[in-house]
Amino acid sequence: MSVSETAEKIKSMEIRGAGRIARAAAEALRDHALSLRTGDLPVFSVEMEKAADTLVATRPTAVSLPNAVHIVMTGLEQAKDTEDARSGLVRRAEGFIRSSRSAVENIARFGARHIRDGDTILTHCNSEVALGCIIEAHRSGKDIEVFATEVRPRNQGHITIRTLNDAGIKTNFIVDSAVRSFIHDIDLVIVGADAVTVNGAVVNKIGTAQVAHTAKEARVNVIVAAETYKFAPRTVIGDLIRIEERSPDEVLPAAIAKTLPNVTVRNPAFDVTPAEYIDLIVTEAGAIPPQMAYVIIREYLGWGIEEFQKSLDLNHHPEG
Ligand code: RUB
């Protein structure tokens, strides 16, 4: 698929969910590299940078997207010629897609072990990895039941209940505001992540923080299933995760909004769950307490503070 088609599909949410967005971006960069006809390395590099920027600009919150693009693009400047640049890029893109798929499978296996026979699990939004854990627990013979929220305003819960239904898992479908009413029926909350910051906060679909807060108050454990490429390196140097605010039409039809001149509709797509509401983050590198997020950023993503020192001139001490 072309870069512009992929970008359009990510913006319109035809391609959605942090992991899928990341893999789609890697695929688009690979296809773009293969389709560029130029033999001129600087031209090739500029074209690839433009494509990377277009993809990264589509949705601001899921850190998996810039991380995937970074992984695919790193090394371009060392290429000897266009063929070297192209083959390196294709290799890195395919490597990322493969390792992303295997991360999802491994997290499902690890996460499933935290689910006990007889558990009732609550999930919010539609996370491939969170559902992977639930489905794996069911496959391994555990008798489980799920509560899935609706997920206003885009109804990702509809996708979740179809997947759970097709997997043969007994599922209850509830509106987002019913979480408190059912929390005492729940043994475990499992959600995905769009970003994990250096202090272990988890950015995920709007409503996740309320779900986690409710769970904490009821002493129900909260597990986040997140691949390592959802950890946000730049939070190490104080960057904040930008929370996407989408069109008000998703919440209230424009025709109605027009009749309410004093009303402003706000539509943030994600929220931030503090580390203290999260018991465990399950990654493909193993499960960690949220407070260990920096270890993942440094050891698994390979982004220590040194990565930033040059660009930010953090070591710059003016003389005299
Ligand atoms: C999706 C969402 C998901 C995470 C993780 O939001 O919040 O929980 O992206 O998903 P949206 P996954 O529908 O706005 O993209 O585990 O599939 O990567």
Image (spheres, helix red, strand yellow):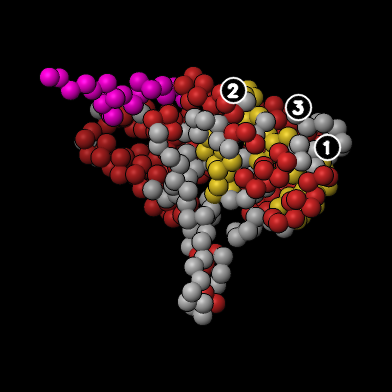
Instruction: Give the residue number, with chain letter if any, for mark 3.
Output: 113
Secondary structure of the residue carrying numbered label 3: loop
299 falls in the magenta region: no
Amino acid under disc 1: Asp
The residue positioned 57% from the left and 65% from the top of the image is 251
Indicate the position of residue 226 as horizontal and vertical percent values: 59, 34
Q: Which mark is residue 285?
A: 2
246 or 83, nearer to the observer? 246
Q: Which mark is residue 11?
A: none
3 or 1: mark nearer the eye? 1
The residue positioned 54% from the left and 49% from the top of the image is 270
* Span of residues in magenta: 300-320
> Circle 1: is it few (<14), some (14-19), or many (20+) Cα within 10 Å?
some
- In which quadrant of the rendered image does the C terminus lie? top left
Amino acid under disc 2: Ala
Q: Is residue 105 above or below residue 54?
A: above
314 falls in the magenta region: yes
Secondary structure of the residue carrying numbered label 2: loop
- Tell me the distance, in whole angstroms, between the alpha carbons under discs 1 and 2: 25 Å
Indicate the position of residue 199 as horizontal and vertical percent values: 52, 30
Dominant SS of magenta comes to: loop
- Tell me if I can see residue 157 in this picture: yes
Amino acid under disc 3: Arg
The residue positioned 47% from the left and 76% from the top of the image is 261
- Tell me the distance, in whole angstroms, between the alpha carbons under discs 2 and 3: 15 Å
Indicate the position of residue 83 as horizontal and vertical percent values: 30, 30
Q: Which mark is residue 119?
A: 1
Q: Is residue 153 above or below residue 105?
A: below
Indicate the position of residue 196 as horizontal and vertical percent values: 53, 35
> Circle 2: is it few (<14), some (14-19), or many (20+) Cα within 10 Å?
some
- Label 1 vs 2, first from the N-terminus: 1
Snapshot quadrant of residue 135: top right
